[in-house]
Amino acid sequence: MNSLLVELISWLIFFFGVGAPLYLIFATIGIRGFKEITSYEPYNALLYRINPIVKIALSITVMIVAAITIWWIGAFLTIAILASYLDLKNGKRKLVIGMLFVISTVVGTAWGYAPFVTSSILSIAFSGYHPVVIWTWPSYFSIMGYQPQLTLQAVEYGLQISFRTSSIMMSALLLVMTNTPSQILRTLHKISVPDSVIFSLMVGMKSIPMVFTYLDESIKIQMMRGLGSRHSRFLKPFYMLIGGIHAIVPTIIHLLRGAKDIAISADTRGFRATKKRSYVEDVRFTRADYYAVVIIVAILGIAGVAILLGFGRTIPYVT
């Protein structure tokens, strides 16, 4: 093949791996979409009535199971958790956003591993490893850490790892979307998590939606002032990316200003003023919580059976 054509295709593959997740994030999900799946909205549904302790236990269970079993169990958990998004407020929209987020995560994570994984690792991950070369990179791609050749096994390796992480992120987002920070704070305090750790987590939960809000506002202001107005709509996501980079400084300034309000709020509510806390709402277990516990036990049981059948590996592999 002509060397110039090889270099052109190589750079196209490179920009696809880097640009496809970003395009999905900015063109389809958007800042508003990220805000919707990282913030709580009041709603009366089953998932909102489950105790936060149970949801935290579910997230930990999903993390453990995805780490110690074969990759397709993690993929199944991802699909099952995504399906539960239909029970949320604006469930269909959040399901679509969640699916797009999973796709961008899978593509981004897979590409983050596939070009860099070495043959020695692949020979451990795949029994009877016989590399199937998909593409040979130009020699100067080694500067970026790329292996000389991209193999089918390397792509499979990246995909398997991505499905292990996607289920964990989806379960964590489910907790955030169905509970207020104060509910999670109360729950963590009940199980004796240190107050300093709880406060850090609560500040993070409160700050993430604020970050997306400030970014969205800043990008919209730049668009209203004409950023990218003279170019086609196809290039809009790239100008949104440029606007997002320009919005970093004003977003940080707004967050620093908001930190003062958070400190005042913590003081006025008497945070850590006494060793014990009082609660307006008591943490109780309902029938929905027991159903969720049964699901957690079932997931652990499936993981145990999978390990006994030989589908338990910490290193991704193909059977």
Image (spheres, rainbow, N blue to C red):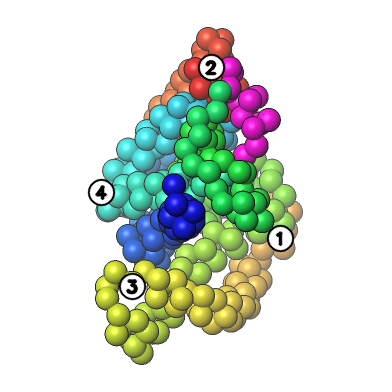
Labels 3 and 4 touching (C-beta < 8 A): no
Task: Give the labeled residue for mark 3.
Answer: 236
Task: Give the labeled residue for mark 2.
Answer: 311
Residue at horizontal 71 percent and vertical 60 percent from the top: 272
Task: Give the labeled residue for mark 1.
Answer: 272
Q: Residues within 10 Å of mark 4 (few under 14, many from 20)?
A: some
Of the numbered discs 3 and 1, the one sitting upstream in the chain is 3
Labels 2 and 1 touching (C-beta < 8 A): no
Residue 177, horizontal then vertical, whole percent: 42, 52
Q: Is residue 27 above or below residue 295?
A: below
Q: Secondary structure at mark 1?
A: loop
Of the numbered discs 2 and 1, the one sitting upstream in the chain is 1
Question: Is 309 placed left or right of 41 in the picture?
Answer: right
Callout 4 amino acid: Lys
Callout 3 amino acid: Lys
Segment colored magenta: 116-129
Task: Give the labeled residue for mark 4.
Answer: 92
For the residues labelled 4 and 2, the Cα–Cα distance comes to 33 Å
Q: Secondary structure at mark 4?
A: helix
Of the numbered discs 3 and 4, the one sitting upstream in the chain is 4
